[in-house]
Structure formats: C-alpha cells, structure tokens
Amino acid sequence: MTAALGYAAEIAKAPLVPFTFERRATGPRDVRIEIAYCGVCHSDLHQVRDEWGHGIFPMVPGHEIVGRVIEVGAQVRQFKAGDLAGVGCMVDSCRSCASCRDGLEQYCEQGFTGTYNGRERDTRQPTYGGYSNHIVVDEAFVLRISPRLDLAATAPLLCAGITTYSPLRHWKVGPGQKVGVVGLGGLGHMALKFAHAFGAEVVLFTTSPGKEADARRLGASDVVISKNKDEMNRHARSFDFIIDTVSAPHDINAYLGLLRRDGTMTLIGVPDTPPTLQFQHLIFSRRKLGGSLIGGIAETQEMLDFCAERGIVSDIELIPMQKINEAYERMLKSDVKYRFVLDIATLAG
Ligand code: NAP
Ligand code: ZN
Ligand code: ZN
C-alpha cells in the first residue's frame, strides 16, 4: 500500500477537503500514474451531492485523469515509466459478458467498476478518483495519450470527449446531416467540436445568450436561445440528430418536435429527475429517443488518436485544487468555459 493525497467529500453534500488514503501496491498488470491534471465533470458534482443515490463516502471524485506513468507491474506490455497515460470513468469490468467481449465495457452486464464511487471487484474496497496525486489501474483500462496535444486540455477528453464522440459515431453523424447540440458546457462544447469535425451542420441550443459567439467559434452555424419559442419554431422538423447534454431537469419534448421524420434524439445528460415524454412526438413522425453512456476502452483510444491527428482538445479553465468548491458553484450557474481542469501540482499547496 502507498499513501495518496487527494480531496474528498467526507459525507454527501459536504465541501471537498484534503484527504489522505491508501492506494494498492502495483500488481503484475497494474500501471501507477502520477496525476498531472484532472477534469471536473458535472457527474462529480451530482455524485458528491449524492443526487443519484448510493454514494460511497468519503468520496474522492475525478474521472478525467492524465499524467505520467511512474511504475509498471512485471506483466505490463503497453506502458513503461515515463509514458503519458490517461484514465477515464472505468477502472475495471467483468471482462466476460457479451458487452465486455464486444469492447463495450461501459455496458458491462455486471456493472463496470467506476474510477471513483465504485468498489474494486476483488477486495470490495472503495475506488478513489483523480482529485489526487497518483492512481493504480490495470493496464487494460489505461489509455495512451499523445505528446502532440496540450496535456491539461486533453484531460476532459477522457469523459466529456468520449461521451459525445461515441453517440455521434454510433448514430453515424456526418456530412449532409443537421445536428442539434443542447447545452454548452463540458459535454456540449465537445459535441459541437466533434459534430463539426465529422462534417455535419451543427446548431447549438442554449439558455445562455452570452455563449453565442463561442458556439460559432466552436463550430455551430446557428445558435438558438431555447427559451425563445419563435427561434425554436424556425427549426421545426429539420434535424437528423439531436444530442442533449443538459445536467438539470428540462423539457425534452420541445426538442423532439424539431426532429425530422425518422430523426433521433439521444440523451446523455443525467438530471436527478427523469424527463416526461409526450409520446405523440415519437409516434406521429416515427422518431427515436435514445441514450448513451461514455464509451468503451477501444473507442476511447480511437477518439484520443482522432483528437491527436486533428488537434482537438477541450477549452479549459485551469484551476488550483483549492478552488474546487468554488468551481462547483460556478458550474451550477452554467458559468464555465468550457471545462474546469484541476492542476494537481497545487494539491499539497
Ligand atoms: P456542465 O458543464 O455543467 O454543462 C451542462 C450545461 O447544461 C450547462 O452549461 C447549460 O448550458 C445547460 N443547463 C444547465 N442547467 C440547465 C437548465 N436548468 N435548463 C437548461 N439547460 C441547462 O455539465 P457536463 O459536465 O457537460 O455534464 C452534463 C450532464 O451529462 C451531467 O448531467 C452529467 O452527469 C452527464 N454526463 C453523462 C455522461 C454519460 O455517459 N451519459 C457522461 C458524463 C456526464 P447552456 O448554458 O448552454 O444552456
Ligand atoms: Zn464525467
Ligand atoms: Zn462485463
């Protein structure tokens, strides 16, 4: 066991405070990573406040982890000390169910092991995330990070990046399609970048009029203030695909009406209360409503390689660890451009 330093919520809804805990010794298939940066996902906030229930406390959040390998086990083949490495939302899965065999570990039928707020499959010890100075992870769940990208701005790709890349790929978004992105936060700004990079025409729906210029810079050809009914109606029955990233309860029916016949809307935001569905929007135009959860390890690597090739990273605000509680408050006000990233070097300060 090795002592680790992090920031934790000791009980649900408590502010994060410095916390020391133990990491396991580096096993034969393990990689130990000295964490350089960790992105701040709205899921961290939902879980620290126990909005999804069953939270394990003390909780050290963080699942957008990048850093440098400092130690590897004897059987590790893909990594050596000194390599850049990343860890996303998962650190293990059953590895034998149909989903795991298909490389879709996020849909593991026994439930994947979360990077934090989960339990190790063998010892049942709680997992602790990336708001900490190092982490030990089986190499099967460690990602290769290109030195060509800015390291801090790469961190959010590990969750916000893959969570938007995966559904856009699954539903084959590309040239000739009109795509809507709902919400311009961490996930939303990556959805804009990817949908634009895949060649689609992209429209952003936002509640924040001040984000219009940024949305256009990030790839939107039009920006709709979602509270304005006239602006919404202009786009009625025109979208092939809409991806909804909103973190709070809101009306999804207004967006279903903007899909063309046979269009698809995918939910990726996880508000604490479920939406209500006016099913006639589906039935009368054969529309589809779906959902999507992060992405598998192989697809996460594919996304990271795509980003390295195309020079895609997140737009970030780098903050010291001590500002995390303030960052959560700003996130709740939709005041983040467009992802907070923790500079883990400040942890001990
Ligand atoms: P975020 O950075 O806080 O962005 C959420 C955006 O939603 C805000 O910037 C805001 O955009 C919009 N919004 C917030 N409150 C709203 C309201 N009351 N009505 C309408 N719009 C509102 O959050 P994030 O990190 O991108 O995460 C978004 C959601 O995805 C969270 O629920 C998170 O837990 C979930 N998530 C899901 C997965 C998955 O695998 N499916 C993975 C990661 C995260 P505007 O200012 O533009 O309106
Ligand atoms: Zn996340
Ligand atoms: Zn499985």
Image (tube, rainbow, N blue to C red):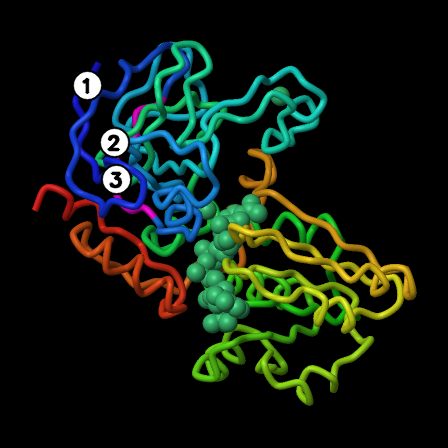
Q: Is residue 100 left or right of residue 236?
A: left
Magenta region, residue range: 31-38
| Ligand 1 is within 8 Å of the C-beta of the residue at disc 3 | no
Residue type, numbered disc 1: Thr
* Disc ID at residue 134: 2
Give how far across and how far down residue 340 sits, in percent.
Answer: 33, 58
Give how far across and how far down residue 176 sits, in percent.
Answer: 79, 70
Q: Is residue 234 left or right of residue 318?
A: right
**Dominant SS type (magenta):** strand
> Along the polypeptide, which appears first: circle 1 or circle 2?
1
Q: Secondary structure at mark 2?
A: strand
> Along the polypeptide, which appears first: circle 2 or circle 3?
3
Q: Which residue is mark 3?
A: 9
Q: Is residue 89 left or right of residue 180?
A: left
Q: Please report contact status of discs 1 and 2: CB closer than 8 Å, yes or no.
A: yes
Give how far across and how far down residue 269 sits, in percent.
Answer: 56, 54
Q: Which residue is mark 1?
A: 2
Q: CA distance from mark 2 to mark 3?
A: 18 Å
Question: Which quadrant would residue 287 be assigned to in this image?
Answer: bottom right
Residue type, numbered disc 3: Ala
Q: Residues within 10 Å of mark 1 (few under 14, many from 20)?
A: few
Instruction: Specify the farthest residue to the left.
Output: 349
Pair 2/3: label in front: 3
Comparing 249 with 261, the one in front is 249
Question: Which quadrant would residue 235 be assigned to in this image?
Answer: bottom right
Q: Residue at x 30, y 15 (%)?
A: 26
* Disc ID at residue 189: none
